[in-house]
Image (tube, rainbow, N blue to C red):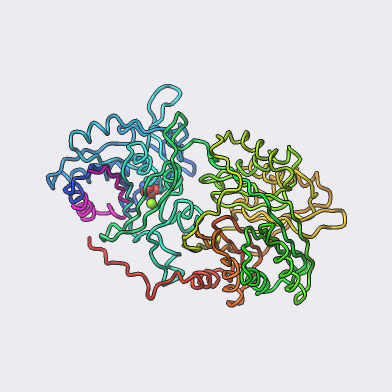
Amino acid sequence: MALLVQKFGGTSVGSVKRIQSVATRIAASKDLGHELVIVVSAMGHTTDELTCLAQAISKKPPQREMDMLLATGEQVSIALLSIALHELGVQAVSMTGAQVGIVTESSHGGARILEVRTESIKQKLGEGQIVVVAGFQGTSLSSGGTAEITTLGRGGSDTSAVALATALDAEACEIYTDVPGVLTTDPRKVANAQLIDTLSCNEMLELASLGAAVLHPRAVELARNYGVLLRVKSSWTYDQGTTLTSQGQRSLGREGLELGRPVDGLELIEGQAVLGLSHVPDKPGIAADLFESLSNQGVNVDLIIQATHEGNSNDITFTVDEIELPKAQKICKNVLQKIGGELLAQTGMSKLSISGAGIMGRPGIAATLFDTLSRKGVNLRLIATSEVKVSCVIDASFGAKSLRAVTDAFELDDNQVKINPKVSGIGEPEVRGVALDPYQAQVCVRSVPDKPGTAAALCCALADAGISLDAIVQSERQQKNGARDISFTLKKTDRLQAGTALVPLLAKWPGSQLEDGPEITRVSAVGSGMPATPGTAGRMFRALAEAKINIAMIATSEIRTSCVVAKADGLAALQAVHNCFDLGGQDALQQKDNFF
Ligand code: ASP
Ligand code: MG
């Protein structure tokens, strides 16, 4: 007999009829002999409607009162669902977040879960009851000692469900929703998007904009860290849906459930070479030619970064294993002969990476890494950031020293630190899904000093303002005084604040200035098999070239390759990339008729 946590979203309990259907479904699971904890959201658009009511009264209602108000939505659903279960002759009891012991931080409106005290829920399960829990809410002790109602932030019921599954050591956490599972891309943009059977939590997190449309990212982070088996299924059918896997094996410690250390891995890969091509023409097909030639001759490229510069030319930089350098150099020279540009090669480099769930959502992490390294006098040759990893390429002679400093900075255990680990992802698909992120803006800081601490200072200044950077790219070319440009992307909504946050820093760098790029969008291909499959990037760039799309920026991480393209090219780029990795099916995915 398995203990399952099943979560039903707002649409699935959106009407009396649907609640009755869900109850029937739950009763059937119970008949199979499972112990069940059910988590539900508020009915339909209740949370939005309640928010509107409050806003009709006040532009800025107090957060505490908002939590008090919004938490009522879920209480309606748990009571109705329990009543429906009783009607079917099934024993069930509804419980609020506080009653099941979901203890959170004291902040309102987006509290993180500290622990789940499982005694009461276990007792009810022991009595043979189905426990129906209000998602999205928890309780905290205010300074006065009164229990306060808190909420976890919009979409938070998924997180309630995974937290319960973690604390109860459930066999699986099943999220029932109104989509068939996680799809290879957004079906509204690419008609033949297909269901993904299985993917890892890391892949899901890297597909940020796609993944977040299906699951609350904090739920995926929890599942990743604690190794919860997560399934996303349609509430309307009995199909298998998507299974999310993870290798996480954290145990419940004294740290808060959602607060534990964000960085849980550190890697150093030695024997790396950097190849930098500068002043290559800025037009479609250049990156495709280069990386196709490399993969055709069996050179596996690791990081790739590219940014556009003034004067209509690009710099492309990438890393390979040192052994491949002579071959790679020859290929680059051949390509440059045709298109023009300069080549610079550097051996004796190492790649240092930290990993953890939700790194990009916590801007302080990348900033701490860069700052730690700069304090040791380490110059960052290349930087690559992603949702679950931040890497930098450094001079090999700094390897040991950097490793020690970073281990200390993130309080890592020896078993979390790996030197020259084996290539991961053998046998996994190179690309599992493709996502479009239209909410990014491209910014360039011109003429910054090329010395240790520059990137750190930039990231720290922005992190202090709560802003995450993505795709940080340092130019290959240097000005006469040695200065370089640093380009990056960030959320559009953070752009204004970023300008303000950088003012004091730019004042310290004479001649430097902030410049906005044109309107962009970012296409990302994600797959665990990417590190083990040569040529993925080349294929992606070729697909874009064939669609006559120019790539403004390239940024890769271990399991993600992202290209920034002009906003107007976004949709075509998504379709081209989805198509080139054969992710589409013959037809549009059958969305089964809603049988409620
Ligand atoms: N009812 C809450 C919301 O609409 C929580 C959830 O549905 O997950 O955001
Ligand atoms: Mg949801």
| Figure quadrant of the C terminus | bottom left
Magenta extent: 1-26
Q: Position of residue 532 (x, y in %)?
A: 54, 60
Horizontal and vertical percent position of residue 566: 62, 68
Query: What x and y, as percent, mark residue 208?
Result: 50, 55
Q: Quarter-wise, where is residue 36 in the image? A: top left
Using the rendered view, name the quadrant where residue 368 is placed.
Answer: top right
Q: Is residue 579 above or below residue 40?
A: below
Q: Nearer the viewer, residue 436 or 98?
A: 436
Q: Quick check: 389 left or right of 398?
A: left
Q: Say which quarter of the image contains residue 137.
A: top left
Q: Quadrant of the N terminus?
A: top left
Which x, y percent locates residue 347?
Answer: 74, 55
Q: Is residue 118 visible in the rendered structure shown here?
A: yes
From this view, report whether residue 123 is shown above or below residue 351: above
As for residue 444 lying within the magenta part, the answer is no
User: Can residue 50 be seen here?
Assistant: no
Using residue 83 as the reference point, say whether residue 422 is left or right of it: right
